[in-house]
Amino acid sequence: MADHCIFCAIVEGKIPSHKVYEDEKTLAFLDIHPSAPGHTLVIPKAHITRVEDLPEEDARHLFAALHKIVGRIQEAMGAPASTIGINNGRESGQEVPHVHIHVIPRNRGDRGGMIQGVSGSPQRLNDEEMARIAKEIRERIKGV
Ligand code: 5GP
Ligand code: ZN
């Protein structure tokens, strides 16, 4: 548990939250400034800042918890859909340095956007550039 981390304080019960789910490794609670009713944050109890630094076991647990509750959140809010996203690092908009998955219930006509819009500048890349990019990524993944 990290000092001064608001989500660690929530895990420890030192500050209150509206919890919706808890197991030994994960916690889910309502976002204090909801983008929609039922906006939920699903977090690992361990203080890890970024997805890539989560131990694999914690990553599995986190996604399993998301999988378990996402349909129930939608059902409870009468929402046919949800946007699921992670701000992974400060430049992406991450303000709380403790991994959290946002689950935002969505409705037709809610005037929200799509995840693909978050980077602000869509790219047109030709096939050669795409092939080079894929190779760069593949080479770094190799042996991981
Ligand atoms: P981020 O930008 O880091 O992905 O989002 C952090 C989220 O945490 C924000 O949507 C914010 O409203 C929420 N949040 C920040 N502090 C608290 C808090 O003390 N309690 C709860 N429930 N949510 C918080
Ligand atoms: Zn923390």
Image (cartoon, rainbow, N blue to C red):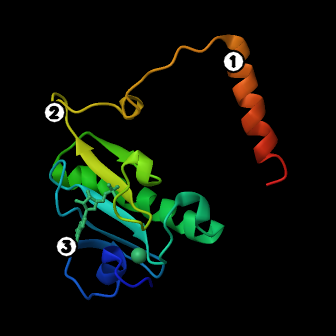
The residue singled out by tag 2 in the image is 110
Which numbered disc flags the more N-terminal residue, 3 or 1? 3
Which numbered disc flags the more N-terminal residue, 2 or 3? 3
Q: Is residue 94 visible?
A: yes
Q: Quadrant of residue 99?
A: bottom left
The residue singled out by tag 3 in the image is 18
**Quick check: 109 above or below 74?**
above
Q: Name the kind of residue labelled 3 in the image.
A: His
Q: Secondary structure at mark 3?
A: loop
Q: Residues within 10 Å of mark 3 (few under 14, many from 20)?
A: few
Which numbered disc flags the more N-terminal residue, 1 or 2? 2
**Quick check: 53 above or below 10?**
above
Q: Quadrant of residue 18?
A: bottom left
User: Which residue shows up at 35% across the image and 64% down it?
Assistant: 96
User: Is the C-beta of the residue carrying label 2 under 8 Å from the nearest atom of ligand 1?
Assistant: no
Give the quarter of the figure containing the C terminus: bottom right
Q: Secondary structure at mark 2?
A: loop
User: Is the C-beta of the residue carrying label 3 under 8 Å from the nearest atom of ligand 1?
Assistant: yes
Q: Which numbered circle lies on residue 129? A: 1
Q: Residues within 10 Å of mark 1 (few under 14, many from 20)?
A: few
Pick out the residue farthest to the right. 143
Q: Name the kind of residue labelled 2 in the image.
A: Asp
Structural distance between the alpha carbons of marks 3 and 1? 47 Å
Disc 3 and disc 1 in contact, CB within 8 angstroms: no
